Image: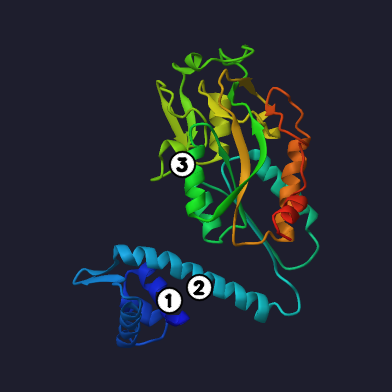
Amino acid sequence: MRLQQLRYVIAIAESGSINAVAHSMFVSQSSLSVSVKELEQEMGITIFNRSSRGISLTSDGVEFLSYARQVVEQADLLVDRYQRGRTRTHQRLSVSSQHYAFAVNAFIRFVSEHDNGNPEEFTLRETRTADVIEDVRSFKSDLGILYLGTSNERPLRRRLEECSLRFVPLFKARPHVFVHEGHPLASKKSVRTQDLANWPRYTFEQGPDSSLYFSEEPLSSLPNSRQIIVSDRATMTGLLRDYDGFLVSTGVRSDEMFAGIVSIPLETDEVMNVGYVVHSQRKLSELAQDYIEQLEDLISQFGDSTVLVPSRGTARHSSKAKASETGEA
């Protein structure tokens, strides 16, 4: 197997045409077809279905493609690190997260503190739960931020174990209900689940992996008269300010949510265990540890006892100390 063969497979899968790929990569169509055929024979699978209508991936091909992308991406990173970047190290950090404002705020702090003129590439992706897990599994991201709760912890931990990921807790929080300050529920000191039944519920879209345990919001199985699904925090914030619906989340509010939006404790035994996942085969970089420390610092400054659930020991535990305990640098 050669790296160039993997690049051919990726290009063909993306374009759906061997002829187009042959033209763009300056290789004859026959040579390209032979190269792919040799790869299929070597791997013992059929990667593409070929017909008069065109070319498409087989089920084995879909799985093979995901691994091929990882191999090519890692190879490109090696070239970039050791050939193109001999004189100046290119610093990289990639974080995937469920939709949490504190993750964004920590990222902004991190970026501002690492503005040192060196070549840098810092990425934060607010995305779906399944994508957070896949990004870390495939080494696309250094770490991913998500929550475990009573209803989803067992299946999610099983999924994390299957992907060789390790969950590290940041904080535990009591679920809160977010509504605009003029909402009929806004004046309550606490809200019962039955109080929510007749109000529209806002949730973040989870795509095809929309099983209950991938939901970003606790108690997602509660019946509601109406459900409104969005994919970004800006739309969610706009809905909360301007419409009589609600969002169930951690209760840790961002600056953008202080104006016109209130959070009310939800009467439930559910606890949200928010943390980050890392690959068990990947050592945390110094940049990743720095970002985690920004997360920990933000949480330590959030002193609302109605939101955070006290943990045993110290509330703030340095990520570098955690790394040393687990053999990470």
- Residue at mark 3 to residue at mark 1: CA–CA distance: 33 Å
In this rendering, the count of numbered labels is 3
Q: Are marks 2 and 1 in contact (CB under 8 Å)?
A: yes
Q: Which mark is residue 206?
A: none
**Residue at x-position 77% and y-position 28%:** 303
Q: Is residue 18 left or right of residue 265?
A: left
Q: Is label 2 in a helix, a strand or a loop?
A: helix
Residue located 56% across and 56% down the image: 136
Q: Could you tell me residue 155's position as x and y percent?
A: 46, 41
Q: Position of residue 327 (x, y in %)?
A: 71, 59
For the C terminus, the quadrant is bottom right
Q: Which residue is mark 2?
A: 72
Q: x and y percent of residue 94 in the render?
A: 63, 57
Quadrant (top left/top right/bottom left/bottom right) for the N terminus: bottom left
Residue toward you, 198 or 155: 155
Residue picked out by circle 1: 6
Residue 37, compared with residue 11, is above or below; it is: below
Q: 234 or 103, which is in the foreground?
A: 103
- Between circles 2 and 3, the one closer to the viewer is 3
The residues tagged by marks 2 and 1 sit, at their Cα atoms, a distance apart of 7 Å
Instruction: Name the N-terminal-most of marks 2 and 3.
Output: 2
Which of discs 3 and 1 lies nearer the camera? The answer is 3
Residue at image mark 3: 155
Taking the spot 44% from the left edge, 30% from the top edge, the residue there is 228
Q: Residues within 10 Å of mark 3 (few under 14, many from 20)?
A: few
Q: Say what amino acid the circle numbered 1 marks.
A: Leu
Please, what is the three-letter code of the amino acid marked with disc 3?
Pro
Which one is earlier in the sequence, the residue at label 2 or at label 1? 1
Q: As displayed, is residue 195 above or below residue 62?
A: above
In-front residue for pair 18/215: 215
